[in-house]
Amino acid sequence: MPKETGSTGVPAPRGARGLRPAGPPDPSSPVRFAALGDSFTEGVGDPVPGGLRGWAALLAEGVADGRRGVEFRNFAVSGAQSGDVRDRQAVAAAAFRPHLASVVVGVNDTLRRTFDLLLLARRLDEVCALLAGGGAVLLTVCLPDPGAVLGLPAPLGRPLARRQAAVNAVVHALSERYGAVHLHMGDRAWVEDRSLWSPDRLHPAERGHRTVAAGFHRLLAARGLALGAAPGLDPSRPPPGRLDSWLRLVTAGTGWLARRSTDLLPQLLCLAGAELRHGACGTGARLDRRAEEALRRALAAVQPDDARTAGARAAPSGPSAAPRVSMEG
C-alpha cells in the first residue's frame, strides 16, 4: 500500500509573478483546492454518471467541514506533460488563488522519445514556485514506474524504471524545498495490488483513487488542513466483470498503443537494444552512471538560488562544463 511521508523542508519560492500570498483560509470562506496534472488526477479509471471523479475530487469532499465549504477545480487533462502543466494549467490555477494545489505530472514525459529530465525539473520548479509563491500548500506524489505497472519485459522496463526513479527523485527534492504534503506511491506494493488498478493497468481503479485520497487526507489532517471526514476505501460500485474488463483493456490498450506507435514504441525498442548490447558486453553499469549524472544535474538545477550560486562558483565554467547528458544510450 502507499506510504505517506511529510516533507520537512522550508519552502523558498523564487517569486510568484505578482501574486499576493493567499494566506490561511478565513473561517467563513471556502477552502480553494486546485488539482493539476494528467489522467491520474483527471480521474480516469473512476467513472461516475456525467464524467470522471478521481482521487482529487474525493479528497476535496473531506478537506472542509460543515462550517466551511470547499471550492474545487480540476485543471488536469489526460495526456498532459510537464510543459502543458507549466504553460497552461499553472497559469489558470494561479488565477484561482488556491489554498491547496496538487501537482502530479511526469509519467507522460517518461513515455516520450523527447524525455529530458533537466527540462522537466525546471518546469516543475517553476510550477511549484508560482503556486507556493501565491500562498498555496502543495500536494505531490511519486509514482511507480510504468514499465512495472504494465508488466513489460526487463529490457523494455528498465529504461522506464530509470526515468521514473529520476522523476521521483526530482519530485522528492522539490517537495522538500517547498514544504509540500508528499504521498509516496513508488513501492512494489502499489504495483502488485491488482485491486487498485483499472483493467487497462494504466490508471487507478476506484479503489486506487480512494486509497490516494485517503492517504492525502491523513497527511493534511496531521497538519490541520483537512477538517472533514476521510474518504472511504470501499468502492461505491462493484468491480467490472471479466468481459467488461477485457473490453476496457482492448479499447484503452489499443488506443494507447496507436497513440504511442510513432513516438514511444520506436524509442523503447532503441532503449531495449541498448540494454541488451550493454548486458551482453558486461557494461550495463554505464547506463546507470549516465542516469545518475543526468539526475545530479537536474537536482542541481532546482536548488535554491543561493545554493546554486555557491555550487556554480565551485564548478568549472565554459562551454564544455555542462554537456547534455542522455538518460540512456
Image: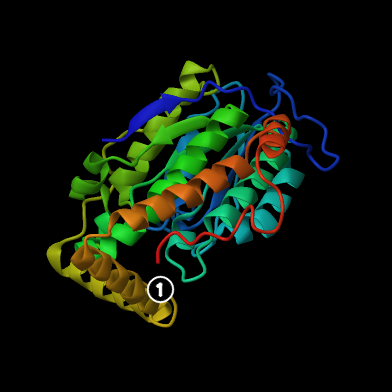
Q: Secondary structure at mark 1?
A: helix
Q: What residue do we see at 47% from left, 36% from top?
A: 59
Residue located beneath label 1 in the image = 264
Q: Name the side, left or right, on which 180 lies relative to 59.
A: right
Visible in this render: residue 194? yes
Q: Does residue 109 sit above or below 215 in this rendering?
A: below
Residue 54 visible here: no
Could you say which is closer to the camera, residue 30 or residue 135?
Answer: 135
Expressed as whole percent of the image width and height from the top left, the position of residue 294 reads 50, 52
Estimate how packed mark 1 is, as few (under 14), some (14 to 19) or many (20 or more) residues with alpha carbons within 10 Å. some
Three-letter amino acid code of the residue under disc 1: Leu
Q: Residue at x 48, y 36 (%)?
A: 172
> Quick check: 304 left or right of 196?
right
Q: Quarter of the image containing the N terminus?
A: top left
Q: Give how far across and how far down residue 313 sits, in percent.
A: 72, 36
**Residue shown at the point (51%, 44%) measured from the top left:** 296
